[in-house]
Image (tube, rainbow, N blue to C red):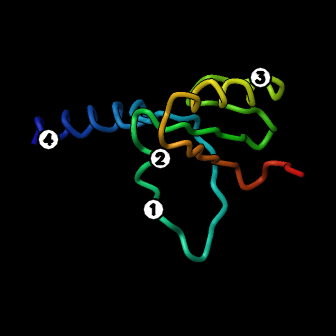
């Protein structure tokens, strides 16, 4: 029983560190689609937080630099898909 509790604690500590992108609270949807390609190591994921900050992976990027950085990353890739995760309360428009 002690070993199981230690393993449980280890998994609880390590699991949040496995995220590759900045955490946002996504809006609930009626028909969600699983995008397994977004979990790949070389996937380009842009996250928009509720306060309007932009993150590429876990790196904060300014609004002026995001276009150039995305262009640089997709320039030599065959799959030019960019995934955008936006917080449900983010202001857009």
CA distance separating discs 3 and 1: 29 Å
Measured as percent of width and height from the top left, residue 13 is found at 35, 31
Q: Nearer the viewer, mark 3 or mark 4?
A: 3
The residue that appears at 47% across and 46% down in the rendered structure is 38
Q: Position of residue 7 (x, y in %)?
A: 19, 36
Residue most toward the bottom? 30
Q: Which residue is mark 1?
A: 34
- Comparing marks 3 and 1, which lies closer to the viewer? 3
Label 3, residues with CA under 10 Å away: few <14, some 14-19, many ≥20: few
Q: Earlier in the sequence, mark 2 or mark 4?
A: 4
Q: Which residue is mark 3?
A: 65
As measured in the structure, the alpha-carbon distance from the residue carrying label 1 to the one carrying label 4 is 31 Å
Element type at mark 2: helix
Q: Earlier in the sequence, mark 3 or mark 4?
A: 4
Q: Which residue is mark 2?
A: 38
Q: What secondary structure is marked by label 4?
A: helix
Name the quadrant of the N terminus: top left
Q: How many marks?
A: 4
Q: Which residue is mark 4?
A: 4
Q: Residues within 10 Å of mark 1 (few under 14, many from 20)?
A: few
Q: Of discs 1 and 4, which sits in the foreground? A: 1
Q: Spatial distance from mark 2 to mark 1, Cα to Cα? A: 9 Å
Does 47 sit above or below residue 76? below
């Amino acid at each position: 029983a002690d070993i199981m509790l230690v393993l449980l604690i280890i998994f609880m500590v390590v699991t949040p560190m496995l995220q590759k992108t900045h955490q946002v609270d996504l809006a609930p949807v009626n028909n969600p689609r699983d995008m397994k390609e977004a979990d790949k190591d070389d996937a380009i994921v842009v996250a928009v937080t509720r306060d309007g900050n932009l993150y590429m992976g876990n790196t904060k990027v300014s609004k002026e630099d995001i276009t150039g950085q995305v262009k640089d990353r997709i320039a030599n890739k065959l799959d030019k898909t960019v995934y955008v995760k936006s917080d449900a309360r983010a202001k857009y428009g």
